[in-house]
Image: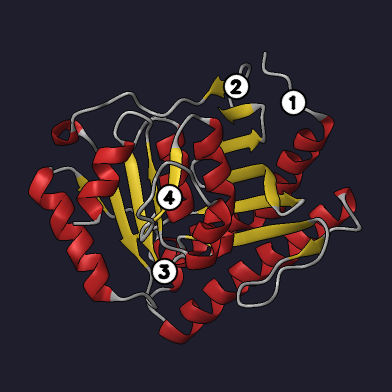
């Protein structure tokens, strides 16, 4: 059985406890869609409930850790970066593909991460230097990126946020489609990264992401043997994860196709 550090056990339990309200709220979403105002207010309330609950539960584990907020300077020292509901549009439309994620930052690097889809009870976690895993009932599954080498056989996700340059995304999408048919737009970048780590996807590219939606998934990919690059990065001999977090423009890819995918996307 996979060894879980006491801290990771507490972190997983905190994420699950904070996410409990989402299952109840998710079952109500479809019924409320007939009333646009009530429906929108309900979705915002669902997000806010999880956000507050995460802050409470994580605060019990590490009371001295701050919470990073998008668009604001990063806190000094150690802190949490949380995404209460990545895939909000999926959630709002009754599609069970969304996640709650938490990344723990220490010494300006992600040291622990959890990505959890409560609707599917699907949880991924990682600690720096200890590997990435998918939670199982008895044994946890060690995650490994895929070993595919041929682009024509690859499955790639491509997403764009509402505030990114649509022209850049279309160029990326066109470049991918020219080489392969298997492109997916799944609507939750944190889950895309978890799927790259698990070998379900061979690569993921996303533009204009919020750092809180990608921080945890980036550690999953790294600990599963994958690579993370900034979309505009020319020299891929090394990675700069902090630059990816700042830009929100990322490529996550397995070890066998990293050069091919980066070159394809930067044509």
User: Is disc 1 in contact with disc 4, using a CB cutoff of under 8 Å?
Assistant: no
Counting other residues with Cα less than 10 Å from the Cα at mark 3, is it few (<14), some (14-19), or many (20 or more)? some
User: Is disc 4 in contact with disc 3, using a CB cutoff of under 8 Å?
Assistant: no
Question: Please, what secondary structure does the residue beneath circle 4 have?
Answer: strand
Whether residue 69 is visible here, answered yes or no, is yes
Q: CA distance from mark 1 to mark 2?
A: 10 Å
Q: CA distance from mark 3 to mark 2?
A: 32 Å
Q: Residue 266 at x, y = what percent?
A: 24, 56
Answer with mark 1 or mark 3, whichever residue precedes in sequence: 1
Whether residue 117 is visible here, answered yes or no, is no
Residue under pointer 3:
208
User: Is disc 1 in contact with disc 2, using a CB cutoff of under 8 Å?
Assistant: yes
Residue under pointer 2:
140
Question: Please, what secondary structure does the residue beneath circle 1 have?
Answer: loop
Answer with mark 4 or mark 3, whichever residue precedes in sequence: 3
**Left or right for 49, reference 255:** right
Disc 1 versus disc 3: nearer the observer: 3
Question: Please, what secondary structure does the residue beneath circle 2 have?
Answer: loop
Q: How is the image coloured?
A: secondary structure
């Amino acid at each position: 059985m996979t060894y879980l550090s006491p801290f990771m056990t507490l972190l997983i339990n905190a994420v699950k406890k904070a996410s409990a309200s989402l299952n109840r709220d998710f079952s109500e979403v479809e019924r409320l869609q007939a009333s646009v105002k009530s429906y929108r207010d309900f979705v915002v309330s669902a997000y806010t409930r999880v956000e507050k609950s995460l802050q409470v539960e994580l605060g019990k584990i590490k009371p001295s850790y701050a919470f990073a907020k998008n668009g604001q300077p990063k806190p000094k020292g150690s802190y949490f970066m949380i995404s209460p509901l990545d895939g909000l549009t999926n959630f709002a439309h009754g599609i069970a593909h969304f996640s709650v994620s938490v990344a723990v930052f220490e010494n300006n690097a992600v040291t622990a991460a959890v990505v959890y889809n409560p609707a599917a009870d699907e949880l991924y976690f990682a600690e720096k230097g200890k590997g990435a895993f998918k939670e199982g009932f008895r044994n946890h599954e060690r995650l490994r990126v895929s070993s595919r080498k041929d682009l024509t056989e690859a499955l790639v996700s491509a997403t764009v946020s509402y505030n990114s340059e649509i022209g850049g995304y279309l160029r990326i999408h066109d470049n991918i489609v020219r080489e392969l048919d298997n492109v997916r737009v799944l609507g939750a970048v944190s889950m895309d990264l978890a799927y790259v780590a698990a070998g379900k996807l061979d690569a993921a590219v996303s533009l204009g992401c919020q750092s809180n939606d990608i921080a945890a998934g980036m550690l999953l990919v790294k600990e599963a043997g994958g690579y993370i690059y900034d979309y505009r990065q020319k020299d891929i001999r090394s990675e700069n994860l902090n630059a990816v977090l700042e830009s929100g423009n990322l490529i996550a890819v397995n070890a066998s196709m990293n050069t091919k995918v980066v070159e394809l996307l930067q044509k």
